[in-house]
Image: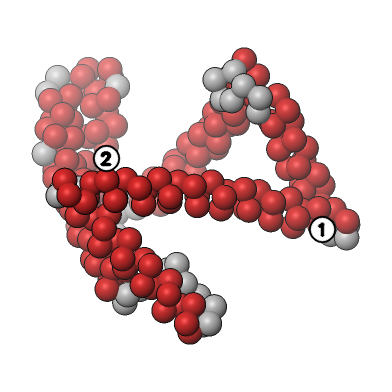
Amino acid sequence: MTKSGRIIATIVAISAGIVVLPGYFIPLFGSPAQMLLGWAGIVIAFALLLGVVNLLRVHFNKIKNREKSYLYSVALIASLAATLIIGGPGGPSSPGGRAIFEYVLRPLESTIFALLAFFIASAAYRAFRIESFETFLFAAFAIIVLLGQVPAGYQLWPDLPLIKEWVMRVPALAGARGILLGVALGTIATGIRVLLGADRPYADTE
């Protein structure tokens, strides 16, 4: 992108942000903000179409040149065509779309979550190696929560489920809220930098 193109993109982004952001708080800016958001939806739709076209172009070239693992490209294109043919006419709520979800996507999600359980177990084993006081606290609270979730925990100590509930309501919830506050402050700071033109993720800075 040329220097003038970057300047124009920055002006457009800052102007759109100045109009859309007050639209959530000031009724006067509500209609222009909704109009810009509608335009953004149209741009996203065209970007999605261009992404699909580029995806097909890249994988067709892989198949044409018989690159390594080109069979995965064949499977991807065949899956895309089958999904459009079966679920495309009626949309996701059509019988074909629901069949794809029930008999393809849901089993794949179950498989991924089943594999994820093994990765979590191995990560927990590495994390539970007590090397400092912080890891000791982490392991102790994790064991309390795990035992408080199962009936065997009540048999070991009747008050263990109550302690588990306190851990989930007080320290865990406080930590989660702290993370959310940090994410919110980071989002605000990033938005301000974009509005001021300090960050330009929408333009090529090279």
Q: Which mark is residue 61?
A: 1
Indicate the secondary structure of the residue bearing disc 2.
Answer: helix
Write the residue at 53% across / 82% down: 2
Residue 19 as seen in the image, left or right of residue 70: left
- Which class describes the residues within 10 Å of circle 1: few (<14), some (14-19), or many (20+)? few
- Which class describes the residues within 10 Å of circle 2: few (<14), some (14-19), or many (20+)? some
Expressed as whole percent of the image width and height from the top left, the position of residue 65 reads 88, 60
Residue 46 as seen in the image, left or right of residue 16: right
Write the residue at 65% across / 28% down: 88
- Decide: is 37 above or below 11: above
- Decide: is 76 above or below 106: below
Query: Which color scheme did the rendering employ for the protein?
Result: secondary structure
Residue 49 as seen in the image, left or right of residue 62: left
What residue is shown with label 2? 142
Write the residue at 45% across / 77% down: 6
- Decide: is 145 above or below 44: above
Which residue occupies the foreground of this view, 187 or 117?
187
Write the residue at 29% across / 32% down: 146
